Image: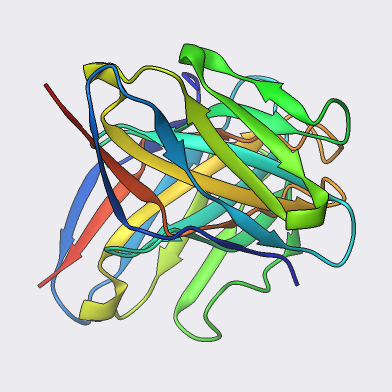
Amino acid sequence: AQSVTQLGSHVSVSEGALVLLRCNYSSSVPPYLFWYVQYPNQGLQLLLKYTSAATLVKGINGFEAEFKKSETSFHLTKPSAHMSDAAEYFCAVSEGGNNRLAFGKGNQVVVIP
Amino acid sequence: NAGVMQNPRHLVRRRGQEARLRCSPMKGHSHVYWYRQLPEEGLKFMVYLQKENIIDESGMPKERFSAEFPKEGPSILRIQQVVRGDSAAYFCASSLGQGNTGELFFGEGSRLTVL
């Protein structure tokens, strides 16, 4: 069964600094990978997704992620953090695009002015 | 992700009561998924439904929980005889179909508090 590991439940980053959120996955078949963002008291919004095309995926709000099969990773980055990036970020995996997503525990990002 | 409507947004129940959570998918979407988010946890898959059919309920607790998606009307997640451990945020998501896009559109969630 597929699974996702996200380390470090809370991540603090200074405004303007690099945002790096790590995601490692486990899957028995080529995975589809996703990053979602959740703002307080809201639902999840898709940031970006990998579906076996280009390994470097660009998403909304300046975020991007790189799929590395050898490392079973799909880390999320943004070169310069903005105050509006404060939110919770979830990595998710599905096997063969079956839409049954397995989510990581999430990273709560705090942006320090 | 506007378009997936969930209600109520907040629900308070006493132990032993029933909770009913409703979800209207995005227009044109016929696939509905329910996920549960416990405090400090990620979302956990519960059930996947199409109109009038339960496709995958492998994430549903064996007792007290049921889900339906009738031909007409919203999908309903029903929790009977609620216990404190049922307190969580319940998210509904919809998709156009099952396929390789993998993108789910989420509602804003229903937050259940059991006293």
Q: Above or below — where is B17 with respect to A107?
A: below
Q: Position of residue A19 (x, y in %)?
A: 39, 31
x 80%, y 31%: residue: A55
Q: Position of residue A89 (x, y in %)?
A: 42, 41
Q: Above or below — where is B46 with respect to B90?
A: below
Q: Above or below — where is A31 with respect to A4?
A: above
Q: Above or below — where is B1 with respect to B12?
A: above
Q: Nearer the viewer, residue A49 or B97?
A: A49
Corner quadrant of residue B95 = top right
On screen, residue B62 versus residue B56, left or right, reads left
x 87%, y 50%: residue: A96
Corner quadrant of residue A44 = top left
Corner quadrant of residue B60 = bottom right
Q: Nearer the viewer, residue B85 or A105?
A: A105
Q: Quadrant of the N terminus of chain A?
A: bottom right
Q: Position of residue B10 (x, y in %)?
A: 20, 46
On screen, residue A88 versus residue A60, left or right, reads left
How many numbered marks are there? Answer: 0
